[in-house]
Image: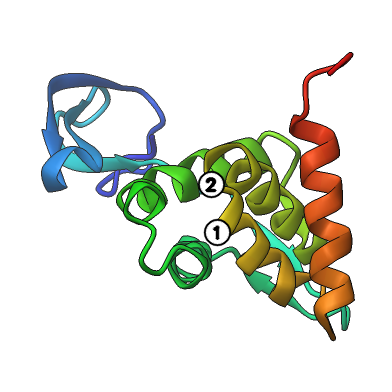
Amino acid sequence: MRCPQCSAMDDKVVDSRAAEDGGAIRRRRECLHCGRRFTTYERLEEVPFVVVKRSGEREPFDRRKVVEGIGAAAKNRPAVAAARDGLAAEIEEELRLEGSEVTSERVGRAVLARLRDLDEVAYLRFASVYKGFTGAGDFEREVGLLIKRSAPKGA
C-alpha cells in the first residue's frame, strides 16, 4: 500500500477489524518510512454475472426475476411458493458455477428442472409460458413427457 504522505511502499498493519456490517475490512496501517498512520478498506469485488437474452442483449442477472417467475407458476401451490426464494438461490448458485455469462434459455431450463422435481402443476404453468404453448395439444405433449419420465420402469 502506498503511503499518502510520502508515497513509500513499506508499511505495517497496526489493526484490522470488520467494517460495513462485514462487507469490508478496515485496516489501520503505519508507514515504515515516515511513521504516518492511515486507514484502508478492503472490499470484495463482485464478478458481474450477466444473462444473454435471445435478442443478444446482455443484462445483469436478477434473482428477483427468477423468484417472480417461480411465484407466478406456483400461485396457489403452497409447497413451491414457500420454497421459491431458496429455489432461486440454488439456481443462481448453479448458474454462477458455469461462468460469468449465461443465456436466458439456460436460466429457463434450470427453473424447469427444479420445478419438475418439486411440483408438476407449477412445472406445467412455467413451461407453458417459457415454451410458448399455443393450445391444449402442447399441454398434452408436456404431460405425456412428465408421465413418461416419472413412471417406474417395467410398470
- The mark total stands at 2
Residue that numbered label 2 is attached to: 119
Residue farthest top in this picture: 154
Does the rendering let one see residue 48?
A: no
Which quarter of the image is occupied by the N terminus? top left
Compared to 137, does 80 lie above or below?
above
In the image, what residue type sits under mark 1?
Answer: Ala
Compared to 21, does 84 lie above or below?
below
Q: Judge left or right: residue 22 versus residue 127.
A: left
Give the crowd class for mark 2: few <14, some 14-19, many >=20 residues within 10 Å: some
Residue placed at 83% from the left, 84% from the top?
135
Q: Is the Cβ of the residue at disc 1 closer than 8 Å to that at disc 2?
A: yes
Which quarter of the image is occupied by the C terminus? top right
Residue placed at 81% from the left, 34% from the top?
149
The foreground one among 84 and 13 is: 84
Helix, strand or loop at label 1? It is helix
What mark, if any, has residue 69 been given in the picture?
none
Compared to 136, does 148 lie above or below?
above
Q: Judge left or right: residue 76 versus residue 137.
A: left
In the image, what residue type sits under mark 2?
Answer: Asp
- The spot of residue 125 in percent (x, y) is 62, 68
Helix, strand or loop at label 2? It is loop
Residue that numbered label 1 is attached to: 122
- The spot of residue 24 in percent (x, y) is 25, 41
- The spot of residue 119 in percent (x, y) is 53, 47
Residue placed at 57% from the left, 44% from the top?
91
State the separation of the CA atoms marked 1 and 2: 5 Å
Q: Judge left or right: residue 60 versus residue 74.
A: right
- The spot of residue 134 in percent (x, y) is 84, 86
The foreground one among 118 and 15 is: 118
Residue placed at 89% from the left, 74% from the top?
137
The foreground one among 92 and 42 is: 92
